[in-house]
Image (tube, rainbow, N blue to C red):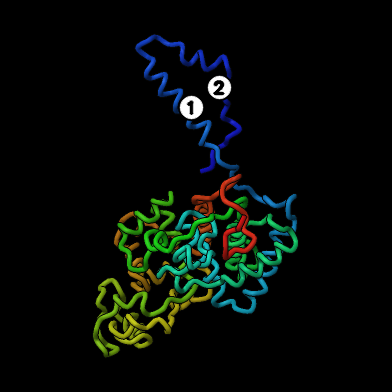
Amino acid sequence: MARNCSSMMSPTSSSVPALLAVHSHHLAAAALVAATLLLLLAGGCHGAPLKAHFYRRSCPAAEAVVRDIVLARVAADPAALPAKLLRLFFHDCFVRGCDASVLIDSTPGGGAAEKDAAPNASLGGFDVIDTVKAVLEAVCPGTVSCADIVALAARDAVSFQFGRDLWDVQLGRRDGVVSRASEALASVPSPSDNFTALEARFAAKGLDVKDLVILSGAHTIGVAHCNTFAARLSGGSGPSSGAADPALNAAYAAQLRARCGPAAAAANNNATAVPMDPGSPARFDAHYYVNLKLGRGLFASDAALLADRRAAGMIHRLTRRDHFLQEFRNAVRKMGRVGVLTGERGEVRRHCRAVNTR
């Protein structure tokens, strides 16, 4: 969480001597306290916290510009674009925090960037962010960060079907200047992760088991390619073959093999896509958890939620749509504060695909 710097007072000329004026056998402890104070005062307040309507004075039209462009694009592609923009936000926040580093293109001299890492190979929505940024640069040059655009676009895209904002977005993020594919490989949760791996990846970002279970509910929209879950299918070629993963509903496994082929073929099939939430693939609702209880979670990482007592205990309540939406609102706002750059840290990129040249 952001530190409230206004509550931290600098030591005055009278307070420092008072702090150090202790009995000689306390001098070592006093020195440690003084050093700690200096570290806090020098390095603990890098930037202001995020806040609502951050651009009210510097770019009053910012949020409206994002909303208008995103809603127009979602209206033209309501089945796919909300999931793409929400996933883009997730993958950005899990590497270096929510700093738009996932948008940066690889360069010949700079090595592979995040977007070219295997976990990000199927990300989409970059063109929407580019369009929004171009308009905002024309209206308010050098003011609105790409990181804030990503956060707003995810919210606006998911909210389209409801006709109202599902959560509020606090703003003031700045853009990162580093993007490495290797860090995406190490940090982005994998569809093959077991619960221990998932918990560790979320904990590394300050997110707990509850956040993990609720944010996994984003799989209620969108599609996945066959190669991302092929290992859960058997090697049999017939539609009645059993599932290799006993946690996968056998009838559902047969449906997946009918679409993707047996496991060996599915492992190389990155062209065919299936809904992640069969029965309600385009609605942002609680149906994901209904499917999960029936063994119809698509990924191994989905099924893993049932393997942990704490996580499994939350799933029944989350099958109620209103409860899920409220909990998701809280969890996604928390995720949106992960590792943010504020104040003087980072920059406001002129083009989201490249760091500024000075």
| Numbered label attached to residue 296 | none
- Residue 254 image-quadrant placement: bottom left
Q: Could you tell me if residue 316 is visible in this image?
A: no
Please tell me which of labels 2 and 1 falls first in the chain. 2
**What crowding class fits label 1: few (fewer than 14 Cα within 10 Å), some (14-19), or many (20 or more)?**
some
**Residue wearing tag 2:** 11
> As rendered, which of 295 and 58 lies closer to the eye?
58
Quarter of the figure with residue 250: bottom left
Q: Amino acid at mark 2?
A: Pro
Viewer can see residue 60: yes
What residue sits 38% from the left and 63% below the top?
185
Q: Where in the figure is residue 337, as x and y percent of width and height?
A: 53, 51
Residue behind mark 1: 37
Residue found 34% across the figure and 75% down from its top: 229
Left or right for 75, reference 235? right
The quadrant of the rendering that contains the C terminus is: bottom right
Residue 219 placement, left or right of 149:
left
Between 265 and 130, the residue placed more toward the observer is: 130
